[in-house]
Image: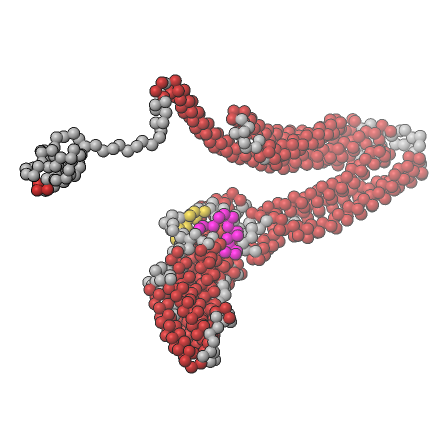
Amino acid sequence: MASNILFLPFRRSHSVNLTDAIKQYISSKYDQHPDMFTKDLETIEKLRSVAVHAQEPHPSNIPKLQQYAAQLIWLSGKFPIDIGVEFPWYPALGYNTSRPTSRNNLRFELANIMFNLAAMYSQLAMSSNRSTPDGLKAAANNFCLGAGVLSHLRNSILPELRTEPPEDMDIMTLECLEKLMLAQGQECFWQKAVKDGLKDATIAKLAARVSDLYNEAGDAGIQSDAISSEWIHHMTAKHHHFAAAAQYRAACDTLEKRKYGEEVARLRDSLTCVNEALKEQRYINKLVLADLNGLKNRITEDLKRAEKDNDMIYLLPVPPKAELKILDRANMVVARVPKEIAESNSMLGERGELGPALFSKLVPYSVHLAASIYVDRRDRLVNNTIVEQLEALTNKIHEVLRSLNLPGSLQALEKPLGLPPGLVAHADEIRQQDGINRLLRSMEDTKKLMYTDQAIYQEGVQILRSEAAEDDGARRKFGTERWTRPPAEQAAPKLYAQIQEIDGYFRAATNSDDVVKKKLKENEYFIQLLSGPDHDLENYVPSGRRPAITGDVEREAGKLRGSFNEVSRLESRRRRKIEALRTKAKQDDINPELLREAARLEREFPMQTIEAVQFETLFDKRLQMYDADQDMVHDEENEQEAAIKRLQDANAAFLIARRGDQSTKKREQALQNLENAYFKYKEIISNLDVGRKFYNDLAKIVNRFRDEARTFAYNRKSEASHLENDLSTRMSSLGLQQATSDSLHQQKQADAQNPNYGATAHAEEPLAAPTPTRANMPSPAGMWTPEVGIRFSGVPTTSGNARPAAGPPQDGRWDPAQGLKFG
């Protein structure tokens, strides 16, 4: 249907399978099962289908596009831009609208929905009844909303597209369309002002702004490859049309103010503008042309009247155009982004206008990554900083006790016969844990983990070595000038750096394993005794006679026992603190706070992908809960130093009181060996647990290294294959050209030795066209032929003889009496 305004056509699309792609991504990247989101998957499929088929200009179709667009904006924080679906869309403008453009890009899908939303607003504006005030208001409002959507598409969505936009959605095309929507919206306000009979000065200001906007749209359209020449001619005609209308209304205003000379000047300029617009009459539709002709007739009539009145009555000077005051502008339109687009995330929810937010229970991958980062950081703080320091303090206690031969010296004195209760308790604990067998099994398990990690690591290294060897072979085959791609170590420096890094891990782990083996070897005999029955222990520990204990010895032994018990209680209390700290760390679940922070980021930055680095402030704040535990380490250290000092003083006094008493010396040493073996057993158990955890963690590293090596080698192999094919093709072509060149060279040499070569040396010069010749056939008697020429009777011949007076000529000359005869 012909109209004096333009509207945006819709972009079209085919159906796609979003469900499979989203399910596959959830399965591979999240810890949640995709079946948890069956309803959400069905909803997103339905929303897309409804939005894609909303191709009729009806107000009920606006929410369909807005709802799907809002979900796409929301999903940008949940899924990557390349989710794994090719979205096909046919261009709406330009000269190639029959071939779709497909992109694996969620933002591309969003951009197309936004374009269709703008098209919907423009078509609703066109379908409005612009003969009524309400219809004009509705049309102007829809044009402003359409311009706002196009502005949002250009400024907020295209910069995040990561690929080149389609031809009909590039920057200049969208700018042209946005200005066109604003121009047509401003035209509605101008038309309403005319209908309402506002002052000519006001109407002139409105028309001038319409002209400006059409001019801006046309300038942008010229720089676009998708805006048709028909549209550009339309916008150019409209620009001049409203420039003429503005000057005409300004002339009417000056007539009212009795500025008759200025009236003539403005009417003349108005006529010039309308004539400029009519230069486009071959390309514009009939309605636009009719508007121009109507305006021209009106201007022409008023100009004749104004010039006549001024020349005969007012006699005022007509100012040149350069002296005319530039008309003021009255802008009534602005690109207004619908709140359903600008604030879409705030309108999603169980009771939101745009429906519930889909996949709201799906934790973004970056949140999982952030949680693992926090756990690693927390565990390093707890285990490597706090617990490690506390255990170092405990080890210092054991070293001091061994150096003081405690508690063996006290046990030998207090219980000269049988086994001390403490030793029996230690032996029972080791037996329940299967003693030496447990250690051997743990060491064997740790060794298997190490071998498995080494095998995976070596597999990755071998993959890289094989790829490097193939690359070197190709470089030797084709040469460094042709085989231009960088060597593997330069192409993947981070991957190759992991080789040295992982190798360093294995060396450090091997050294630690050797230390553990040495500890076990040194204490294996005593651990086996503790693992065995009591009578083996009784046989090992010699029984002594009850010594005569003096008052001084008894008093100093009591003090030493008190100091020793104090140290033991300190160690037991510390052990409980370590267990409480580990329980605290185990129960430290940061996920709820991460989800709250992620939800806040999604609301405030809907188009921004959430990264783990955005949670650093939350990490720092959360780790402050362990500040008190770090302070506790210093308190423990101070308390332990004081307790050890008292123990050492008490032991020195005890030794002085027992000076010269050797009756329990052997029993003291045996008890002390078993006591030391018990603590070494506990230490080896702890070392093996750390080693097992280390190799389990290392397994993740070497598996990732091997997978990255496989991917890198596969990509390099594909790249090498393409490069080799290109080189082979080029070399074959060069070989063919060389063969042809050699053949031509040999031919030239043969031609040079040919004696006829000089005659044919210029064979390549253009040949002259052959001259046509007539066949040699005898002509009938008396018939003229071109070879004879034309000779008239009575004309002297070359011999000077005249023709006889009577009879036909006998020498072939033409006889006028015979007429003309052609062979």
Whether the magenta-drawn stretch holds residue 160 is answered as: yes
Quarter of the view holding residue 777: top left
| Of 624 and 790, the residue lying toward us | 790
Q: Residue at x 37, y 25 (%)?
A: 761
User: Farthest bottom residue?
Assistant: 313
Above or below 355: residue 703: above
Q: From which residue to which does the magenta span run?
A: 154-167
Q: Is residue 635 above or below residue 246?
A: above
Q: Is residue 639 above or below residue 519?
A: below
The residue drawn where x is 53% and y is 26% is: 479
Residue 78 appearing in the image: yes
Residue 291 at x, y percent in the picture: 36, 68
Which percent across, then down, holds residue 333? 48, 67
Quadrant in the picture for residue 659 = top right
Residue nearer the viewer, 684 or 87: 87
Q: Quadrant of the C terminus?
A: top left
Can the viewer see residue 139? no
Residue pictured at 68% horizontal, 30% vertical: 507
Task: Name the one closer to the observer, 326 or 242.
Answer: 326
Q: Does 580 sit above or below residue 459? A: below
Q: Nearer the viewer, residue 755 or 259?
A: 755
- Counting labels gives 0
- In the rendered image, the quadrant that contains the N terminus is bottom left
Q: Residue at image x 78%, y 32%? A: 676
Residue 794 location in percent, x, y? 12, 40
At which x and y percent is residue 99?
38, 48
